[in-house]
Amino acid sequence: MNSDVSIAGDPLAIPHLLPPVPAHPSTVAEFAGLARSVAEDRASWEHLVRYDATSRWYHRLRTGPGYEVWLLSWVPGQGSGLHDHGSSSGVLTVLEGELTEQSGQARRTLGAGAQRVFAPGYVHEVTNDALTPAVSLHVYFPGLTEMTMHSGQCSARADEAVTV
Protein backbone atom coordinates (compact mmCIF):
# COMPACT_ATOMS: atom_id res chain seq x y z
CA MET A 1 0.00 0.00 0.00
CA ASN A 2 1.24 3.42 -0.91
CA SER A 3 1.26 5.86 2.03
CA ASP A 4 1.81 8.89 -0.17
CA VAL A 5 -1.29 10.98 -0.57
CA SER A 6 -1.48 13.58 -3.25
CA ILE A 7 -4.19 16.07 -4.00
CA ALA A 8 -4.77 17.06 -7.56
CA GLY A 9 -5.39 20.74 -8.15
CA ASP A 10 -5.43 23.59 -5.67
CA PRO A 11 -6.62 22.50 -2.20
CA LEU A 12 -7.47 26.12 -1.37
CA ALA A 13 -10.06 26.05 -4.14
CA ILE A 14 -12.10 23.58 -2.09
CA PRO A 15 -14.43 25.79 0.00
CA HIS A 16 -14.67 23.52 3.05
CA LEU A 17 -10.87 23.66 3.49
CA LEU A 18 -10.80 27.46 3.66
CA PRO A 19 -11.10 29.36 6.93
CA PRO A 20 -14.46 31.09 7.36
CA VAL A 21 -14.60 34.55 5.83
CA PRO A 22 -15.88 37.22 8.22
CA ALA A 23 -19.17 38.77 7.09
CA HIS A 24 -17.65 42.25 7.33
CA PRO A 25 -15.13 44.20 9.36
CA SER A 26 -16.28 44.50 12.95
CA THR A 27 -13.91 47.03 14.53
CA VAL A 28 -12.85 50.56 13.69
CA ALA A 29 -9.33 49.27 13.01
CA GLU A 30 -10.70 46.68 10.55
CA PHE A 31 -12.73 49.34 8.68
CA ALA A 32 -9.63 51.59 8.53
CA GLY A 33 -7.72 48.54 7.24
CA LEU A 34 -10.40 47.93 4.60
CA ALA A 35 -10.02 51.53 3.45
CA ARG A 36 -6.23 51.17 3.29
CA SER A 37 -6.46 47.93 1.30
CA VAL A 38 -8.85 49.48 -1.23
CA ALA A 39 -6.62 52.57 -1.44
CA GLU A 40 -3.57 50.41 -2.17
CA ASP A 41 -5.42 48.60 -4.99
CA ARG A 42 -5.19 51.54 -7.42
CA ALA A 43 -6.18 49.33 -10.35
CA SER A 44 -9.64 48.88 -8.78
CA TRP A 45 -10.44 52.60 -8.63
CA GLU A 46 -8.02 54.80 -10.57
CA HIS A 47 -9.68 54.28 -13.98
CA LEU A 48 -13.07 55.28 -12.52
CA VAL A 49 -12.11 58.75 -11.29
CA ARG A 50 -13.76 61.68 -13.08
CA TYR A 51 -13.40 65.38 -12.39
CA ASP A 52 -16.46 67.62 -12.66
CA ALA A 53 -16.02 71.39 -12.42
CA THR A 54 -19.72 71.95 -11.63
CA SER A 55 -20.15 69.53 -8.70
CA ARG A 56 -18.24 66.99 -6.69
CA TRP A 57 -18.07 63.66 -8.50
CA TYR A 58 -18.74 60.46 -6.55
CA HIS A 59 -19.09 56.78 -7.29
CA ARG A 60 -20.13 53.91 -5.03
CA LEU A 61 -17.17 51.59 -5.43
CA ARG A 62 -18.19 48.65 -3.27
CA THR A 63 -20.85 47.41 -0.88
CA GLY A 64 -20.60 44.72 1.73
CA PRO A 65 -22.74 43.48 4.57
CA GLY A 66 -23.36 46.60 6.62
CA TYR A 67 -21.01 48.99 4.81
CA GLU A 68 -20.34 50.84 1.57
CA VAL A 69 -17.24 52.33 -0.02
CA TRP A 70 -17.41 55.58 -2.00
CA LEU A 71 -14.86 57.21 -4.28
CA LEU A 72 -14.96 61.03 -4.58
CA SER A 73 -13.04 63.59 -6.60
CA TRP A 74 -12.57 67.23 -5.68
CA VAL A 75 -11.38 69.94 -8.06
CA PRO A 76 -9.82 73.02 -6.45
CA GLY A 77 -12.41 75.04 -4.54
CA GLN A 78 -14.99 72.26 -4.19
CA GLY A 79 -16.32 71.38 -0.76
CA SER A 80 -18.87 69.20 0.96
CA GLY A 81 -20.62 71.88 2.94
CA LEU A 82 -21.08 71.48 6.68
CA HIS A 83 -22.72 68.08 7.27
CA ASP A 84 -22.97 64.92 9.33
CA HIS A 85 -23.54 61.31 8.25
CA GLY A 86 -26.56 60.53 10.41
CA SER A 87 -26.24 57.17 12.14
CA SER A 88 -23.22 56.09 10.08
CA SER A 89 -19.64 56.00 11.28
CA GLY A 90 -16.96 56.50 8.69
CA VAL A 91 -13.39 56.41 7.52
CA LEU A 92 -12.18 59.13 5.15
CA THR A 93 -8.91 58.36 3.33
CA VAL A 94 -7.17 60.83 1.02
CA LEU A 95 -5.92 58.96 -2.04
CA GLU A 96 -4.44 61.81 -4.07
CA GLY A 97 -3.93 65.51 -3.48
CA GLU A 98 -4.84 67.36 -0.33
CA LEU A 99 -8.10 68.09 1.49
CA THR A 100 -8.92 70.38 4.40
CA GLU A 101 -11.28 69.23 7.14
CA GLN A 102 -12.95 71.75 9.46
CA SER A 103 -14.69 70.48 12.60
CA GLY A 104 -15.48 72.83 15.43
CA GLN A 105 -12.54 75.18 15.76
CA ALA A 106 -10.09 72.56 14.45
CA ARG A 107 -8.83 72.80 10.90
CA ARG A 108 -6.68 69.98 9.48
CA THR A 109 -4.86 69.56 6.21
CA LEU A 110 -5.02 65.94 5.06
CA GLY A 111 -2.48 64.80 2.48
CA ALA A 112 -2.42 61.58 0.47
CA GLY A 113 -2.52 58.59 2.81
CA ALA A 114 -4.13 60.46 5.72
CA GLN A 115 -7.18 58.89 7.34
CA ARG A 116 -9.89 60.30 9.59
CA VAL A 117 -12.24 58.01 11.52
CA PHE A 118 -15.48 59.48 12.85
CA ALA A 119 -18.53 58.42 14.85
CA PRO A 120 -22.23 58.88 14.02
CA GLY A 121 -23.38 62.49 14.21
CA TYR A 122 -19.89 63.95 13.68
CA VAL A 123 -20.24 67.36 11.99
CA HIS A 124 -17.54 68.53 9.60
CA GLU A 125 -16.82 70.20 6.30
CA VAL A 126 -14.28 68.94 3.77
CA THR A 127 -12.86 71.18 1.04
CA ASN A 128 -10.15 71.16 -1.57
CA ASP A 129 -8.24 74.36 -0.77
CA ALA A 130 -5.26 73.27 -2.87
CA LEU A 131 -4.45 74.19 -6.45
CA THR A 132 -4.61 70.60 -7.72
CA PRO A 133 -7.44 68.02 -7.79
CA ALA A 134 -7.87 65.51 -4.98
CA VAL A 135 -9.38 62.03 -4.70
CA SER A 136 -10.73 60.48 -1.51
CA LEU A 137 -12.19 57.18 -0.38
CA HIS A 138 -15.03 57.00 2.17
CA VAL A 139 -16.15 53.88 4.03
CA TYR A 140 -19.49 54.20 5.86
CA PHE A 141 -20.86 51.68 8.34
CA PRO A 142 -23.69 51.09 8.30
CA GLY A 143 -24.11 52.20 4.71
CA LEU A 144 -24.89 55.88 4.26
CA THR A 145 -28.64 56.52 4.42
CA GLU A 146 -28.62 60.19 5.38
CA MET A 147 -26.36 63.20 5.18
CA THR A 148 -27.72 66.13 7.12
CA MET A 149 -26.54 69.54 5.96
CA HIS A 150 -25.89 72.17 8.62
CA SER A 151 -25.68 75.93 8.38
CA GLY A 152 -23.46 78.29 10.33
CA GLN A 153 -20.51 77.49 12.54
CA CYS A 154 -19.49 73.86 13.04
CA SER A 155 -20.12 72.80 16.63
CA ALA A 156 -18.52 69.35 16.61
CA ARG A 157 -15.78 68.78 19.16
CA ALA A 158 -12.39 68.23 17.57
CA ASP A 159 -11.91 64.99 19.51
CA GLU A 160 -14.93 63.28 17.93
CA ALA A 161 -12.82 62.06 15.03
CA VAL A 162 -9.44 60.40 15.03
CA THR A 163 -6.62 60.75 12.56
CA VAL A 164 -4.97 57.39 11.91
Image (cartoon, grey):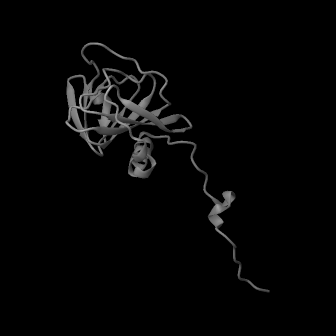
- The answer to which quarter of the image holds residue 123 is top left
Q: Give the position of the C terminus as an image quadrant.
A: top left
Q: Residue 20's spot in the image, x, y percent? A: 61, 52
Determine the residue positioned at 28% across, 44% down.
Answer: 112
Q: Give the position of the N terminus as an image quadrant.
A: bottom right
Furthest-front residue in this view? 53
Q: Residue 98's spot in the image, x, y percent? A: 24, 39
Q: Residue 145's spot in the image, x, y percent? A: 49, 24
Position of 47 relative to 159 (above/below): below
Furthest-bottom residue in this view? 1
Determine the residue positioned at 67% across, 57% down.
Answer: 15
Depth order, front residue of 54/5: 54
Q: How many marks?
A: 0
Q: Residue 55's spot in the image, x, y percent? A: 35, 26
Depth order, front residue of 41/28: 41
Furthest-top residue in this view? 152
Determine the residue positioned at 50% across, 42% down.
Answer: 25
Q: Is residue 109 left or right of residue 85?
A: left
Position of 12 relative to 125 (above/below): below
Q: Is residue 81 left or right of residue 62?
A: left
